[in-house]
Image (cartoon, rainbow, N blue to C red):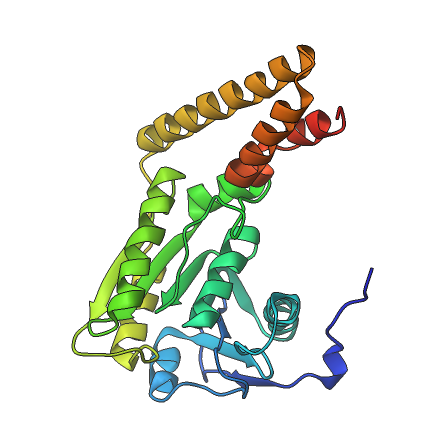
Amino acid sequence: MSGQPVNLAEERYVVYVPSQHAARGYGLLVFVPPWQDARLPQGWAGVLDRFGVVFVSAARSGNDENLGRREPLALLAAENIIRRYPVDPERVYVAGFSGGSRVALRLVLGYSDLFHGAILNAGSDPIGNSEVPLPPRELLLRFQNSTHLIYVTGELDTPHANEDLVSMRSMRQWCVFNVDNFVQPRVPHEVATAAALSRSLGDLTNSTQPDPAKLDACRSAIETELETKLQSVESLIANGQKAEAQKRLKSVDERFGGLAAPRSLDLASRF
């Protein structure tokens, strides 16, 4: 296996630290860009000051890089800011623009124990497939319980606005209900304005928990579907139909990802 593709001593970040923070500490916004340089988007500083949020973004983390660099760069940014400054763990967020927003979605889904919200700016995907698989059960439950997603796209950026609708529909299918979406009037495919950032941070700051009854009912339906599909695989194996069982297990794995483990791994070991 190849080693870690990031040598932190050779990496560069831009960090913006407001002069004041709330009693529990700063908020933190880790930003994944589509560009290669490390910069603070124009107009964002005043908003970060008002909300007491530290901003950090890595260089050489744009769309020209692969996930093997972009994700660890963002995680290392969060870890080092948290070590260096007083940060409120309930206000740690990830954001991105365009291709960086797609990375931010993967980060908030996979690391819901770190990030409590995400600002997805003009770039999103559905979850629960081979491209964006579900994390292990504990992290998925945390994602459903306490993660707040904000979708922000320009009115004139029609392709990405349509992608947001598909992504939000998949969130509802996977019992992720703490989701907000708004359109920036007359804005094309551009990074969020200061006003949009302000609204997003305000929504994240005032986040509420999803309705417990609605969440339980949704989870129960998913568990029933998963159990039915896994039992189907087990029956095929028991009847000696291993080729068909393998095909169905692959389908289960693509749809349910970490939610199906470790049982899916046990079944795979029987081929």
Instruction: Choose top left, top right, bottom left or bottom right for residue 71.
Output: bottom right
- Front position in the image: 87 or 31: 31
Instruction: Give the number of marks.
Output: 0
Does residue 82 appear anywhere in the picture?
yes
Name the residue located 45 percent from the left edge and 48 percent from the top edge: 127
Name the residue located 41 percent from the left edge and 56 percent from the top edge: 125
Q: Position of residue 140 (x, y in %)?
A: 51, 42
Q: Is residue 9 left or right of residue 118?
A: right
Q: Quadrant of the N terminus?
A: bottom right
Name the residue located 50 percent from the left edge and 19 percent from the top edge: 228
178 relative to 151, above or below: above
- Seen from this angle, which residue lies furthest left? 185
52 relative to 219, above or below: below
Q: Position of residue 208 (x, y in %)?
A: 33, 48
Does residue 23 appear anywhere in the picture?
no
- Front position in the image: 44 or 164: 164
185 relative to 267, above or below: below
123 relative to 217, above or below: below
Q: Quadrant of the C terminus?
A: top right
Name the residue located 54 percent from the left edge and 88 percent from the top edge: 37
- Front position in the image: 55 or 85: 55
Q: Position of residue 32 (x, y in %)?
A: 50, 73
Q: Is residue 98 left or right of residue 11?
A: left
Instruction: Choose top left, top right, bottom left or bottom right for residue 174.
Output: top left
